[in-house]
Image: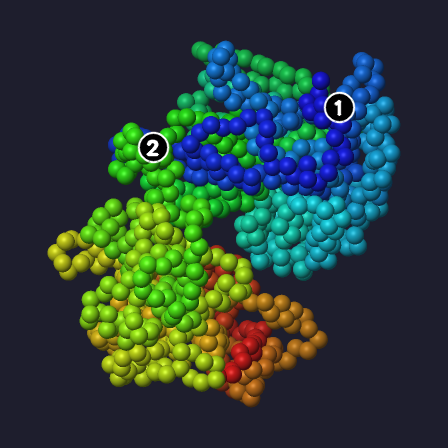
Amino acid sequence: MAPHSEEANVSNRDHESITSNKNDLFVVNSPNVTYSDEEIRSKYTYRTTLVDQTREGMLVATPKETKYEFKVNRKIPRTGMMLVGLGGNNGTTVTAGIIANRRGLTWETREGPRSANYYGSLVMASTIKLGIDIKTSKDVNIPIQKILPMVHPNDLVIGGWDISSMNLAQAMDRASVLEPSLKSAVREEMAKMVPLPSIYYPDFIAANQEDRADNCLEGSKACNEHVEQIRKDIRDFKFKHSLDKIIVQWTANTERFAEIISGVNDTAQNLLKAIENGHQEVSPSTVFAVASILEGVPFINGSPQNTFVPGVIQLAEKHKAYIGGDDFKSGQTKMKSALVDFLINAGIKLTSIASYNHLGNNDGKNLSSQRQFRSKEISKSNVVDDMVEANNILYKENEHPDHTVVIKYMPAVGDNKRALDEYYAEIFLGGHQTISIFNVCEDSLLASPLIIDLVLIAELMTRIQWKAITNDGISTEEFQNFHSVLSILSYMLKAPMTPPGKPVVNALAKQRSALLNEKVQLSIKSFYKQEIQLEQQIPSRTLATKAGDGFTEVELVNSLDPLSRRWDPDREYQKLAICHINTGPKHVSFMGRIVNMKSYFGTSTEQPKASGWHQMIIKDDTGAIFVKLYFATTPFPLQLGLLLTLWTAFVSETLPGNMQEQQQQQLLVRTNTINVNMFPGRVASDHILIHHKTSSSLMMNLCRRPLEYQVTRELSKLVPLDSYLKNGHDVNGIKILVVVKNIGPSRKVKRKDGSGKENEVADVGLMDNTAECCITLWNDIISSAHTWRPNDTVLFITNPGYRSPQSTASHSRGGLQILQHTMIEVDPNVKNAHWLRQWAKRRARQEAMIWEPTEDDWRFETSLCGTIRKFFTLAELDNWTRSDWNKSFTGYVNVIIRSMNICRLHLRSKLMAGQCCGNLLYSNSCVSECATCGKSTSLLPNASIVGQLLDETGCIDGNSLLWSPKAWENLFGRPPEAIAAWSTGDCDLFEQRLCFLRVHLHVGWREAHVSLYK
């Protein structure tokens, strides 16, 4: 009986049954897994070994354990599969196969009756060991499809595109893959399916395919219209069939390899621009990939071409969309990856591999073109590389077996591909071994189950999320998706993609292990692996409980990680604004943002079980309150400006008299000062909810209004920064409104208490339209600054501490610091804050030294070929900008380069420049790491390279201009990144060559885009 043939009578299952979220095959009895109607959660310890080499050549192996928590959404979505090449051999075969299985068909052949099945599918026709039978001690195996809630192929809704207008019944006849009796059984349903118009770029497909192209969108090269039409097709298909998810898969013909060109397809931005400009090196498959990514649906490439150029991968990472590829691994290559792995692991040295194929289907016809064959040759030839590199006994560095691939088009054999492999190996004492394999396979019938597997697994990955947990079993992270590049799909693909920097694995056994053990099982292995105990996950003294202490393991975990526990109080809490909270025992909840915080580590007499506490000021729009928040093991992930909801059963008035009086004056809360002590997890009535991120505009604007603020009048004691630095720091209750200018790197400072311990300190530059200064942040508050954006984040500071002037010029007027009663409100919702943010952006644009692409760059670029091209002298250019600075224009100037500073900047390691976190970065390389955030930033040539430019009417410094990457490339005759590789001699040569050279510059002036409404 074919797998799942017993379900053939449910072809008309309704939507509710399709999206069933129950798995009735097995249930797991383990403390590491929890079930709910919506999701499955599990904890898993991943063990690996890190290897380092000493100077003496000794390898040091260090075991490493990483603990993860996984979350699987149990609801099975209604899923659509859209194939590019729906009318091809693979598209028609997989469609007919799903229809036959859905209807439970049986048909006659020369060998007798045959029934529909999913043989060849890893998911549908393979099993995995669940465990040992408790009675017989035999292995218990279950279908892979039953491990987790997965879409059944019978429930897939099929559609797609093709360059041929044939309906699927006609295309099925043309393919000549299926038995006539089976075709007759599915013909009526197949005839109703007609592919959507596809895109056809003749330069990428073999010329012998042109006669099929009668169902194409207008245009023979990439354009935005093609991208938008594909996106519309996806949306329409999803709406028409009431789908929850769609997976797009390329099953069409092999394309030629696309050239990777700097400025065209090397980055996401360049790729989108290349599509807009109709660049000839953007392939049809890349256009489909870009459309799928922008639409947020997974895209899988089943052909060998390089669809996923660097710009596509970067775009997928940016939009957090899934991609996978390349080239279905159905026949010869699958056997090769298994046999080569076996021989090399057996210590047999392969010295040559000769692979010959001939086939007669349309794939073979397309591959008879040399450029398309080259794509296939590359994907087939790299399949043994990682296996060879793994054995440094048999193969020296850079030594590989000779590997030849030949593919011929023989129409007579049709879809029955012939594959002949000869393996020639060296064995003991100079002997040799030859292995020859002759394989006859029906190509499309082997590829179709892989198409199904790719869709099922890709869909499953969209429902699995993970997060790391500490050795104490506590996580401070949010659940996140896997990397955009789905390397988990490598078992089904010849040239598997991996995330950038990760090794490629081609050995078939390792790929299956990675799929079932390291990915799919990774999220469920702890369901039935009993060796992963809670004590191993949380090796803390707090878990060393005695038998019979009355606490369950779940209760212990909840006490250590209160953020993860489900808050379901057994009594009602009154939700109040802070100004309405009174002291005494009462169950209240309130919401507010953190405006001051400091963390302390150590024991407390009030809570001896705590490892430390956070001292915070929480503020809403009506008042502020002191909160002392204890933690059991790990501090809470708190930052200034973070929105919290707190539940407590007691509000106290326990501060000393002098501090209470100071708090009452400084916070302007109310006549009786209040204080809250909380220990979530230990105290059952206490709980905290951290609102990390929200897409709701209402939540984003909550608790952002300063105290006593009214739209119709100015805030009292709000002074400019200049006035504060002169004499305002002595005034009680003073307020300043500033914008973040830059965020400095953190540094270590030894404590003055003689303990030898160090504090972490960082300076953040602040400014308004009157002055600039720095505010000093210490220890845990520094992480707050990493979320601030220079020239965009506004801070409203009440009662800042004043730091006396230092000897350095940057601190000549003094600076700010955070005291116990200081309140810092991040991005307050006041009119002055909006004005200040706009002012900062305009100033940053006026003082910019680094080219930053903007949304209106296309107007500047297209003006190169415009009908109006005005020539300016430098004097005229000055007059135009001064007459109306808020007007944009472009034109040309003809100038002489009077001086260059290439050598001087090269010697000072400032040849290239960039900006990150508001700080300028300099280096002699094209990439530099930001000392503040640690991110790698691409650099462009320093604008100061160009000295003085002059014409007959005036002069201008080169660093007064923002030079685009294209301008640098035209000036030096090479890409900007090549400049970073120059030696001192190269710099001197180019400096002498460019001095006193007359050049035309295409220049532009961009309007401010700032509304001043102060």
Q: How far across and down, in percent of the image, does residue 115 sit?
A: 76, 20
Task: Name which of mark 2 and mark 1 comes first in the sequence.
Answer: 1
Q: Secondary structure at mark 2?
A: helix
Question: What is the quadrant of residue 105 in the picture?
Answer: top right
Give the left or right position of residue 158, taking residue 913 as reference. Answer: right
Q: Residue at x 73, y 58 (%)?
A: 225
Give the left or right position of residue 831, taking residue 449 as reference. Answer: left
The numbered mark at residue 398 is: none
In this rendering, the answer to whether 717 lies above or below 358 is: below
Q: How far across and down, in percent of the image, does residue 73 sit?
A: 56, 41
Q: Is residue 572 visible?
A: yes
Q: Nearer the viewer, mark 2 or mark 1?
A: 2
Q: How far across and down, in percent of the image, does residue 446 sit?
A: 69, 26
Q: Secondary structure at mark 1?
A: loop
Neighbours of disc 2 within 10 Å: few (<14), some (14-19), many (20+): some
* Residue nearest the observer in this picture, 382 or 699: 699
For disc 1, the marked residue is: 116
Q: Residue at x 64, y 32 (%)?
A: 453
Q: Amino acid at mark 2?
A: Gln
Question: What is the quadrant of residue 360 in the picture?
Answer: top right
In this rendering, the answer to whether 957 lies above or below 371 is: below
Q: Amino acid at mark 1?
A: Ala
* Residue nearest the observer in this picture, 120 or 660: 660
In this rendering, the answer to whether 586 lies above or below 1014 is: above
Q: Residue at x 31, y 74 (%)?
A: 671
The Cα atoms of the two marked residues, 2 and 1, are separated by 48 Å
* Residue nearest the observer in this picture, 272 or 261: 272
In this rendering, the answer to whether 867 lies above or below 534 is: below
* Residue nearest the observer in this picture, 958 or 605: 605
Q: How far across and down, in percent of the image, does residue 13 sit?
A: 73, 35
The numbered mark at residue 536 is: 2
